[in-house]
Amino acid sequence: MLLREHLLKNVNKNLASLIFEISKMYELIKRELPYRRGSTNRRNVYGEIQLVVDDWANDFIIGELEKTGLVKTVVSEEEADVVKINKKGIFNISLDPLDGSSNIESNNLVGTIIGIYKKDFPTPGRNIIAAMYMLYGPVGTLVYATKKGVHEFLLTDDGFVLTRSNIRLPRKGKLYSIGGLRKDWIPEFKKFVEEIEEKGYKLRYGGSFVGDSNQILHYGGIFGYPSLIGKPEGKLRLVSESNPISFIIEQAGGRSSNGKKSILDLEYTSLQQRTPTYVGNKKLIKELEKALKNK
């Protein structure tokens, strides 16, 4: 089944149209990646040197969202403020235009992460009505989730074709994917990782949140970018990264956490807010939360 047909059967017309229009951006974004390498001389709102590809992808995606007539506002990792697009728009969008963009130089996974809301920002992740990501990998992948389920599509000559419907995380996971330097992990977290290593979980970390989360969706296990010594809020951005991926993993039968409670229940304080982020099998996340209680 092609993406458009699947959308029209499973979500309302406006949401189906929005997700389909976003999917049409895939091929142009991937085609531009070889030509958008290097850094700009600017820093983003987080003080990080902005890559050429981040800047381009942000402008391109926001411009295409504006053309749909369906989008009211956009909150992007690359923007300091809410971008107002259309007062008559229906949806509010959170956007990480190119997650893992530093991987482009080494030809590793990058992707686009999108959260879709009807409520205006600021609003908690629990109010997401749909989330999706596109992976620009060796095989083009699109995953979208609503409260009715999570579905994966692969890009073919005919368009995005459904390959897995109503995805559920495997009951017993295989992988762990953890960011940050081990020397900077807090002792309780380090002990937790050592315990799951003893149980046979295999390390597989690619430095792209969307890519690492996608493999957890396939194989089960746990992804974490933890609270670090000297950096208690970790690295990941709540609105543009953690909320959409947490929504997808939870709809697939998994769980998300900041170490204490679901990411989706965190209070939204600013566009630049970061949070320790853990997603994966429910059992593992519960064990992690228990381990971190001793902190």
Image (cartoon, rainbow, N blue to C red):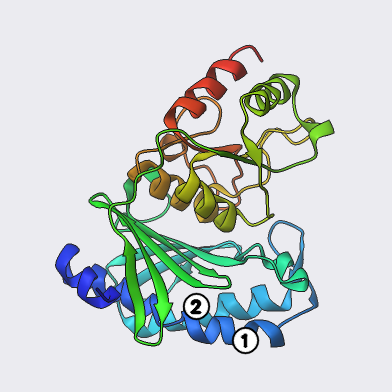
Tell me where residue 90 sits by quadrant. Answer: bottom left
Up the image or down, 75 lies above or below 14; here it is above
Q: Amino acid at mark 1?
A: Glu
Percent x, y for residue 130? Answer: 32, 57
Q: Residue furthest top?
A: 294
Image coordinates for residue 220, horizontal then vertical, percent: 48, 41
The residue closer to the viewer here, 188 or 228, is: 188
Residue carrying label 1: 32
On the image, the x and y values in percent for residue 208 come to 64, 57
- The disc, 1 or 2, on the residue closer to the chain's N-terminal end is 1
Q: CA distance from mark 1 to mark 2?
A: 13 Å
Numbered tag placed on residue 200 in the rendering: none
Q: Mark 2 sits on what residue?
A: 61
Compared across the picture, whether 111 is left or right of 218 comes to right
| Amino acid type, callout 2 | Ile
Which percent across, then down, holds residue 154? 41, 72
Residue drawn where x is 44% and y is 83% of the image: 64
Whether residue 88 can be seen here = no
Q: Quadrant of the C terminus?
A: top right
Image quadrant where residue 66 sits: bottom left
Residue 149 placement, left or right of 97? left
How many C-alpha atoms fall within 10 Å of the one at disc 2: few (<14), some, or many (≥20)?
A: some
